[in-house]
Image (cartoon, helix red, strand yellow):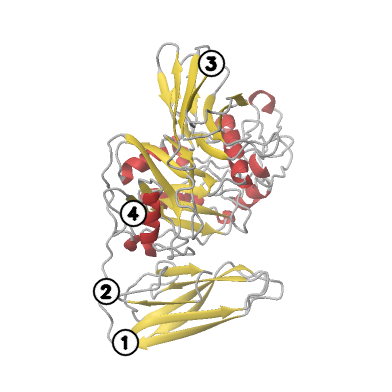
Amino acid sequence: MLPAGSPDHAYEPFDVPPGVREVRVAYTYDRSPGNALDLGLFDERGTGSGFRGWSGGARTEFFVRADEATPGYLPGPPRPGTWHIALGPYTVAPQGLSYEITLTLTYGEPGEAVQPVYPPERASGRGRAWYRGDLHLHSWHSDGRRTPAEIGALARAAGLDFVNSSEHNTTSAHAHWADVAGDDLLVLLGEEVTTRNGHLVALGTDPGTFVDWRFRARDDAFGRTAATIRAAGGLAVPAHPHAPCVGCAWKHGWDAADAVEVWNGPWTPDDEVTLAAWDAGLAAGTCRTGPAATDARPDAGPSETEVRPDADLAAGAGRTDDADTATGPNTGLGAGAWGTGPSETEVRPDADLAAGAGRTDDADTAAEPNTGLGAGTSRTDPATEVGRTDHADIPTRPNRAPGPVRLLPAVGGSDAHRSPDRVGLPQTVVLADDLTRAAVLAGIRAGHCYVAESSALSLDFTARAADGGTAGIGGRLAVAPDTPVTVRVAVTGALRCTVRLVTDQGVLHTSPPLPVTGSGVVEWRTTPARATYVRAEVRHEAALGPLPGVMAAFTNPVFLGP
């Protein structure tokens, strides 16, 4: 029996004697409303390094042996020792959650251990070009219903050049994509790290890289987790940050993120909220962080006691310290807080509470290092202490490290699990030097990408200065503030859609509906003094009065000015 308020994970130990050929586990539990119990396995190496698989709530039984394992679990010999069944009480009703486990050990000669074969890191590309991919997919190796082969066929039908394997909390699918990949389809490997305070896509990691999901925002582990992902060659991408499901909303902060999944599956209101929040972060500078901020978060100082409330569904801004009238508060993606002055104990919404931003300063009148995108935390990964800012550092406390800024790019993924989920709705279109793992990830990291509803829609988005200088998506047109700039959007495959141009001031230009051919060109003129950045949206016709239509495509911004 697990009582209400149980820890996030419990472990049932059992002994595996010599001579065991197969370990099989089955479980049942009280599925009364309010109860949900996940399931996994760790071998004799322990609950730290001995990961052997995870099925969450998708399966009621599994097996592992040397030559084979249930999808979600890693094959390998059942070595003697103490193993652990991992239980994850995702939610527990007030009356508690009763469960029963049946363990079956089968003796005999072990089968021949399988050697994993992984997909290649290169496909036949077109040199430097735009490549289309789906960054967030699930097969039957977690809670999906499709095989990797079925997903590969759907990806090709959707016109994709690459996909990313992102099963919940397991890497078992990695060795099952080699036959799916080909000269026409690059398969990246990763994981959806499913914490109790939000989900994180580990994108394009080395084969077999296991990323532990057993932490909450209060554990301040996101910095270390993101560093683990980057050390394995991948990118850390928070997924569906404002999704309404239990535990899905992102509350870990943003300084360690490499990109953010703004569009998840069919366009829904929570995507609209995430887009608005991400855009607010662009305006506040909280979605552009310096090089040092990519691995850790700046610390708020040892004696601070800030308490920050919820992500405020986008901005969370509104801090009004005595010195904030000149520089203004952070306004992006939960970046700011709702404090009222330097000597007050600030009360800030739930995302920041979860992320541990619970400290104030006795001299907080300088720019506060809020992080944006929903959490506004301000602590450093204790393992690295990178970016730590104590009282002596108050004059340089913005959340951007000194030096060049970088964009926190927006991406999209289908999160497709089963029919009728569409693989490739949406798809991230990346400008990459070639169709390789390294080149695709570099293009995403630089923000050279846009998100579209299908391969039928393409766009070209540039900003050109009067002197001839040009910048594209994710770039900067470094010209004087009063330099005339022409922004140009060329769209194909967007029947009856309109084009909106968005700056740090909001939507400043909306085109008439595109022709019935679905193709058109929109131009607009501005200067860096009027627009810190410009990004493009392609929207379907609005269904309800002043509300914007469903998204057909959007770009990362072009920044203007020195």
Q: Which mark is residue 19?
A: 1
What is the tally of numbered marks visible in this picture?
A: 4
Badge 4 element? loop
Q: N-terminal of the two: label 2 or label 3? A: 2
Give the crowd class for mark 1: few <14, some 14-19, many >=20 residues within 10 Å. Answer: some
Q: Position of residue 278 (x, y in %)?
A: 57, 38
Cβ–Cβ below 8 Å for labels 2 and 1? no
Q: Quadrant of residue 504?
A: top right
Q: Residue at x 45, y 59 (%)?
A: 138
Q: Position of residue 264 (x, y in %)?
A: 53, 48
Q: N-terminal of the two: label 1 or label 4? A: 1
Q: Residue at x 49, y 64 (%)?
A: 143
Q: Quadrant of residue 7?
A: bottom right
Position of residue 118 in the picture relative to residue 247 (left or right)? left
156 versus 526 height, above or below: below
Q: Which mark is residue 113?
A: 2
Q: Nearer the viewer, mark 2 or mark 1?
A: 2
Q: N-terminal of the two: label 2 or label 1? A: 1
Badge 1 element? loop
Q: Nearer the viewer, mark 4 or mark 3?
A: 3
278 versus 48 height, above or below: above
Between the residue at mark 3 and the residue at mark 1, the CA separation in whole angstroms equals: 75 Å
Cβ–Cβ below 8 Å for labels 4 and 2? no
Please name the amino acid that badge 3 sits on: Thr
Please name the amino acid that badge 4 sits on: Asp
Give the crowd class for mark 3: few <14, some 14-19, many >=20 residues within 10 Å. Answer: many
418 versus 366 height, above or below: below
Please name the amino acid that badge 1 sits on: Gly
Q: Quadrant of residue 110?
A: bottom left
Between the residue at mark 2 and the residue at mark 3, the CA separation in whole angstroms equals: 64 Å
Q: N-terminal of the two: label 3 or label 1? A: 1
